[in-house]
Image (tube, helix red, strand yellow):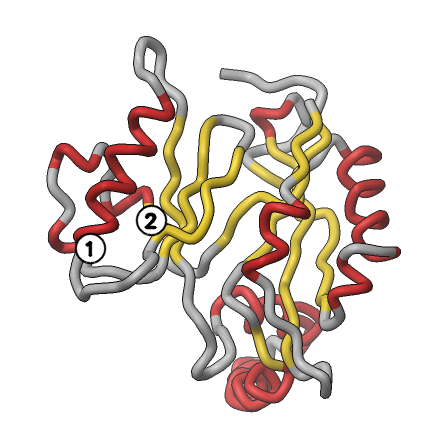
Amino acid sequence: MILDNFEEIRPLLRFSEDRDLYYFIQVMQREKDGNPVKGQKFVRSYYVDREEDLFGKTGQSIRTACHDYNARAYIKLNVCSYRHSALRSLGLLSDLILNGTERQLVHLLESVSGKYSARGSDKFWTIDIDREEGVDTLQKVDAASSFLSEAQPPCGDRVVAVLDTVTGKHIISRPFNPSQIPAQALFKGDDIKKEGLTILYADIKDIRP
């Protein structure tokens, strides 16, 4: 199965001329995709600060990695900033030194990029809508989107995209008050990824239920 959301996420991306803004992408192997790993295994990270790279050589590298490792590539749609990530890293670096865990330095940018976004940037949340036997997935998407359009605080176009995933759909939404989710919305708070993580590409051969 090949799943390609490159063009679908393109309108949501924002780069800067000074190349301070970047998108964090990780290629992961999943046990449920038939890989001999427990849960999931990290393959490779990408830090992309130019649109032409993501839709050029870097994009091809991501596709190749997914093919070679029977893997999925996930992109964090909430854009990061090298400057802000560097400032965050300073505090974490001192903690590594104090705790005698300096060897973890190699994972520092990866950790910061996964947790933090650029200040003042647009924020996106991902609502995970899984396929269920006997349930129309598009009907679930419509029910969730209907709630989101009325959710507080008021927002013009809260739903900005609906993307295919390996097991259903991702609704990409602007933030809302998650304490007001009614049962008829057909999703729960646990289905929300506030870092805006979604699938960019997948090339997998065996999907387990």
User: At which x and y percent is residue 9?
Assistant: 59, 51
Q: Earlier in the sequence, mark 2 or mark 1?
A: 1
User: Image height check: is 79 above or below 94?
Assistant: above
Q: CA distance from mark 2 to mark 1?
A: 9 Å
In depth, the one of 65 and 51 nearer the eye is: 51
User: At which x and y percent is residue 109?
Assistant: 64, 73
Name the residue tied to disc 2.
Answer: 192
Badge 2 vs badge 1, beta-carbon distance below 8 Å: yes
Q: Residue at x 63, y 66 (%)?
A: 23
User: Image height check: is 46 above or below 42?
Assistant: below
In depth, the one of 102 and 40 nearer the eye is: 40
Name the residue tied to disc 1.
Answer: 178
**Quadrant assignment, res 69:** top right
Q: Residue at x 22, y 32 (%)?
A: 186
- Horizontal side of 179 relative to 133 (left or right) equals left
Q: Residue at x 31, y 15 (%)?
A: 135
User: Image height check: is 160 above or below 38?
Assistant: below
User: At which x and y percent is residue 111?
Assistant: 57, 68
In depth, the one of 46 and 200 nearer the eye is: 200
Amino acid type at circle 2 is Ile
Give the crowd class for mark 1: few <14, some 14-19, many >=20 residues within 10 Å: few
Q: Residue at x 73, y 61 (%)?
A: 46
